[in-house]
Image: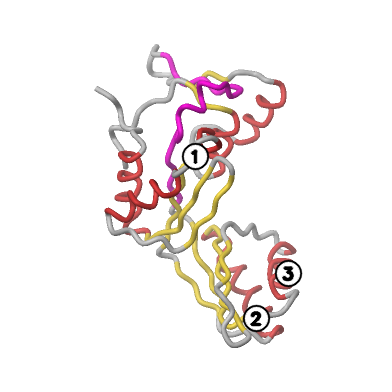
């Protein structure tokens, strides 16, 4: 276990559970949460080996928003792809990602560097299982649009925090970044939503980053 002192949640909202399920938490399938949320059906998740009370997945209430971050997730099955020297003109990103979508490849995080001398570097992440197909598509498109080489990096991981409390609390991103900075973990890509912040980091530093974030947001078990 990465964080053996992780605290069990008494409650979690449908939206938080959906985010965590999409980020690799192997607890619930996203489809079951969609159905429960649509019909407002509370779900009690508990161990089959214990009579202890588990975690309730339910509609969010005001008290839930007092908890800024509900959980930390880690995904190690992603790879980063970079297309060098993409012409800096309208339609290039559309051309690349339309071709990937046509092959059924789901792109996760995307970062485009600042233009330099008429071209940019475009980086994005995909699950490792899609990497061979991704490379075939991107190398073909890169040649067609006059971009440069396509490089890959499989030594990355994605660490995320999830919490509906982010809606009403400031400084959450700074706190996450500071926790990783103290552990000398460099952030390569960042993606955010209303209740989620995700960072691509070195895979070798992933477990250290998760433990640091757990500690920073008080997610460890209180004895």
For the residue pair 170 and 206, the one nearer the viewer reads as: 170
Marks 3/2: CA–CA distance: 12 Å
Mark 2, other Cα within 10 Å: few <14 / some 14–19 / many ≥20: many
Identify the residue under disc 1.
162
Q: Is residue 65 magenta?
A: yes
Q: Where is residue 198? Give x, y as percent.
A: 49, 51
Mark 1, other Cα within 10 Å: few <14 / some 14–19 / many ≥20: many
* Mark 3 vs 2, N-terminal side: 3
Quadrant showing the C terminus: top left
Q: Where is residue 92? Give x, y as percent.
A: 71, 75
Marks 1/3: CA–CA distance: 30 Å
In percent of the image, x 35 and y 33: which residue is there? Answer: 219
Q: How is the image coloured?
A: secondary structure
Numbered disc 2: secondary structure:
helix
Numbered disc 3: secondary structure:
helix
For the residue pair 195 and 1, the one nearer the viewer reads as: 195
Quadrant showing the N terminus: top left
Identify the residue under disc 2.
142
In percent of the image, x 36 and y 62: which residue is there? Answer: 186
Marks 2/1: CA–CA distance: 35 Å
Identify the residue under disc 3.
94
* Mark 1 vs 3, N-terminal side: 3
Region of the chain picked out in magenta, as a range? 53-75
Is 115 left or right of 51, judged from the image as shown? right
């Amino acid at each position: 276990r990465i964080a053996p002192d992780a605290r069990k949640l008494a409650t979690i909202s449908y939206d938080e559970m959906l985010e965590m399920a999409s980020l690799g938490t192997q607890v619930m399938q996203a489809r079951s949460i969609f159905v429960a949320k649509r019909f407002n059906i509370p779900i009690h998740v508990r161990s089959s080996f214990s009579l202890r009370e588990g975690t309730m997945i339910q509609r969010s209430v005001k008290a839930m928003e007092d908890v800024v971050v509900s959980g930390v997730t880690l995904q190690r099955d992603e790879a980063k792809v970079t297309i060098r020297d993409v012409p800096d003109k309208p339609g290039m990103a559309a051309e690349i990602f339309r071709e990937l979508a046509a092959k059924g490849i789901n792109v996760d995080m995307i970062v485009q560097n600042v233009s330099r001398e008429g071209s940019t570097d475009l980086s994005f992440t995909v699950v490792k299982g899609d990497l061979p197909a991704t490379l075939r598509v991107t190398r073909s498109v890169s040649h067609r649009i006059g971009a440069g080489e396509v490089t890959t990096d499989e030594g990355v991981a994605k660490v995320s925090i999830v919490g509906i409390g982010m809606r009403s609390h400031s400084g959450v991103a700074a706190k996450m970044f500071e926790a990783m900075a103290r552990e000398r973990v460099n952030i390569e890509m960042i993606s955010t939503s209303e209740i989620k912040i995700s960072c691509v980091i070195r895979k070798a530093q992933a477990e250290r980053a998760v433990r640091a974030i757990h500690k920073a947001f008080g997610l460890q078990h209180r004895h």
